[in-house]
Image (tube, rainbow, N blue to C red):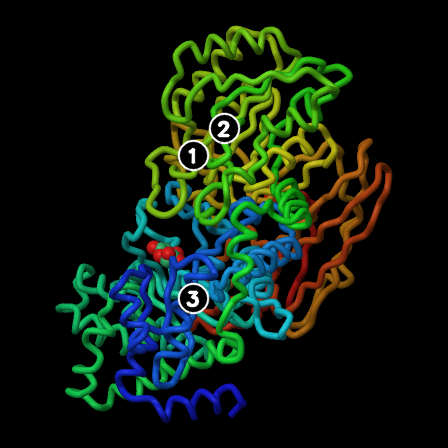
Amino acid sequence: MDKVEQRAKDLLAKMTLAEKIGQTVQYGRCEEREHKLVAEGKIGSLLNVHGPKKINELQRLAVEETRLGIPLLIGDDVIHGFRTIFPIPLGEAASWDLEGMEKNARIAAEEAAAEGIRWTFAPMVDITRDPRWGRIAESTGEDVYLSSLAAAAKVRGFQSPNEDGYPTVAACVKHFAGYGWIEGGRDYDTTDMSERTLRETVLPPFEHGIRAGALSVMSAFSELNGVPASGSRYLLRDILKREWGFDGMVVSDWESIEELIYHGYAEDRKDSALKGLNAGVDMDMQSGVYLDHLEALIQDNPELLELLDDAVLRILQVKIRLGLFENPYVSEEAEDSLKGQAIPASHLAQARDSARKSIVLLQNNSGILPLDTGKHQKLALIGPLADDRHNSMGCWAWKGRDEDVVTVWDAFQSEIAPKAEVFFEPGSGILEELDDGVERAVKLAGQCDVAVVVVGESEAMTGEHYNVTSITLPPCQERLIQELKRQTDTPIVVVLMNGRPLATPWLHEHADAVVEAWHLGTATGLALVDVLTGAYNPSGRLPITIPRATGQIPMYYNRKNTGRPHLYEDYIDCDDDPLYPFGYGLSYTTFEYTDLQLERHQIGRDESAQVSVSITNTGSRVGEETAQLYIRDLVASSTRPVKELKGFRKVWLLPGESCTVHFTLGREELGLLDERLEFTVEPGKFHVWVGPHSEEGLQAELAVV
Ligand code: GLC
């Protein structure tokens, strides 16, 4: 038994039943009632409490007023930044920059911990293939390989050691499990999937986050295969705690234990408390059912005490691991200094770097980009999101301050003028037309050399429960661009600022350039100007397929071949292919792949093969390429996807420069779950590709014998 567990057990042995139950209670509001409960040792954790002074005041109640002085654990949704806001997770995933993701999480954790937050409800690791779902913005996209690596990177970042050697904040991989599979893209709806899908696609990012040391897991709102996740012994005890040996703690989602009643899975609040505890939910977020009913349940059924003890032990271990008993308080000088203080320059620099790496160049006809202030002397900046501080941060931007955000218009004025004349006209609202807005925008564009049009979604159109039935631009914005195209000959560069893939086939046909910018956070304008002017050569690659139409959903690259591939079109009213495929992104330079080599074309089931390919920058600018390795297992005991991402390498190359990148294909990459869902490597042929995205690459063949 390690020292932490021993210390937790010693403390547990001293606790009364009421004190034990108190540790399992979390509230997300903090008025007089909660203050009193804290002082009585009946609350173990709080969220949505802000400011060092307030947090210390509550902590003093727990540490100095209660019998055992067990400190509170203060949590918050630090999803993509705390004060400094980084790109939304879907945008950050487009960088394929795992180090950058870890850096962002570390900075977010430092900023949050400086204000007394020691637990974040992040990373969200739900795989999803449904852009109708608002929470796709919080995901890292459709692919299990990329999402698994991202999950681990963020856990490492959030839990990076502080100056005392403790994790800066506890991470919380969520929402366990299957939440991204909700029917119809409707948040909180039913999820139903095969055990194979659960094991192959949904669970790996969680397991990667846990193997990276995540101290907590959050159980989902949704039901999985007939059992709500927050009442599922199978998920929480059999898989998470027993099979994976997870020794951290499980917190429910907001009131999701009480919601077992509405699912039709619990009779009443008391029954929901029993089912939550039985399932393995250690802490009840906000519903109060543990506080209200565990004592009576345990008095009626003393065997339940063992489950309560396990839950409390887990909670105490997390608090001990965070060093909360040694350092329960936070310095209060931050309280005042942070109020007016600009965010640290180094944090803004990282936000700018992360944001520009997240930008995906989707289209650049006739090389209109990068903007050339020598030629393009007059630049029109148009669109409702070009000067919108709040919406530039995207969903879950929580403590991000509008005044810290650099909008595109800010950056046009500070970074481009006076090299060129810059002008701004919104032209339209986000959801409504502006009186004469289109006319003013058309007039301005007609007088300029290039029009940069920033359109997309407000933060309140993405994120939790902001689901849509149509993944298209709001009509007023599409009309703005159409009128610019119809009434002027000015080249149009469209910048999309959004929290989900948008099906914009018209833009694909008519815009001179299309840039996918997601919601980039505090450094939005700086990052976009870096990319639009070529100061930074765009290197983002799509972490999610962009469909042509909502009706194609679910659409993802690693689909099955089916028994009738291409016998008929998928739809009679739409092209089969996506608008832009997974892994896609352009650069201002070009790259050529040559000389794909397999060290061996035949290996045994426990052997591996080295794969190498040469990449040359055949263009005129330095640039970064993300070489992607895909495989296809041609025949297996279960049908396999037509492609699966199994590796990627990011390389910067000077014009004319070449390099060779290497991959290893072994058991980890070639294995699958057989018909008994046991991991194995089956003999047979594999196709291997290395290339710039999921629809292009040099191909080779590998045989496993
Ligand atoms: C929300 C979300 C969850 C979040 C929690 C606390 O409803 O589902 O992701 O961490 O409640 O705010």
Residue 637 in view in this figure: no
Quadrant of the rendering where the C terminus is positioned: bottom right
Amino acid tagged 1:
Ser
Q: Which circle marks residue 385 in the picture? A: 2
Residue 552 occupies quadrant: top left
Left or right of 195: which side holds 665? right
The alpha-carbon separation of the residues under discs 3 and 2 comes to 34 Å
As drawn, 675 above or below 521: below
Q: Read off the residue under disc 1.
A: 458
- The answer to whether one can see residue 183 in this image is yes
Residue identified by numbered label 3:
74
* Image coords of residue 456 (percent x, y): 47, 30
Which residue is drawn at the image coordinates 71% and 17% (left, top)? 420
Q: Secondary structure at mark 3?
A: strand
Where in the figure is residue 43, as x and y percent of width and height? 32, 73
Q: Nearer the viewer, mark 3 or mark 2?
A: 3
Q: Residues within 10 Å of mark 3 (few under 14, many from 20)?
A: many
- The residues tagged by marks 3 and 1 sit, at their Cα atoms, a distance apart of 29 Å
Locate ligand 1 by image quadrant. Answer: bottom left
